[in-house]
Amino acid sequence: MITSSYQDLLIIWEEKGVKKNTATHTAVIVVVVVVVVVVVVVVVVVVVVVVVVVVVAIVLSAAVAAAVAAAV
């Protein structure tokens, strides 16, 4: 997916007459890698937050159930 997008970008550059430039290619690769890393980090953080919320909800519901059972 990333590779094909990069190749598409190169084709567009060639069509527009942009010269192939190693520095530009490196910059594009760096940007793509940074974007991918940021997306992965965000996804991991979201998953961790969801897991923590679910665990807390389970613990709280168990505590509430125990309290209700004790009260009754």
Image (cartoon, rainbow, N blue to C red):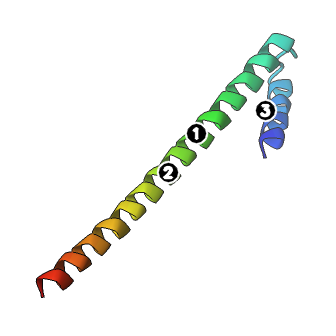
| Label 3 close to label 1 by CB (< 8 Å) | no
Residue 15 coordinates in the image, percent (x, y)? 84, 28
Count of numbered circles on the image: 3
Q: Which callout, 3 or 1, points at the residue further toward the start of the chain?
A: 3
Residue 24 coordinates in the image, percent (x, y)? 78, 15
Residue labelled with disc 1: 41
For residue 27, what is the image quadrant? top right
54 relative position to 13: left or right = left
57 and 29: which one is in front? Answer: 57
For residue 18, what is the image quadrant? top right
Q: What element carries label 1?
A: helix
Q: In this view, does 70 lie above or below 11?
A: below
Residue 57 coordinates in the image, percent (x, y)? 34, 66
Residue 9: mark in rendering:
3
Q: Nearer the viewer, mark 3 or mark 2?
A: 2
| Label 2 close to label 1 by CB (< 8 Å) | no
Q: Is residue 14 above or below residue 7?
A: above
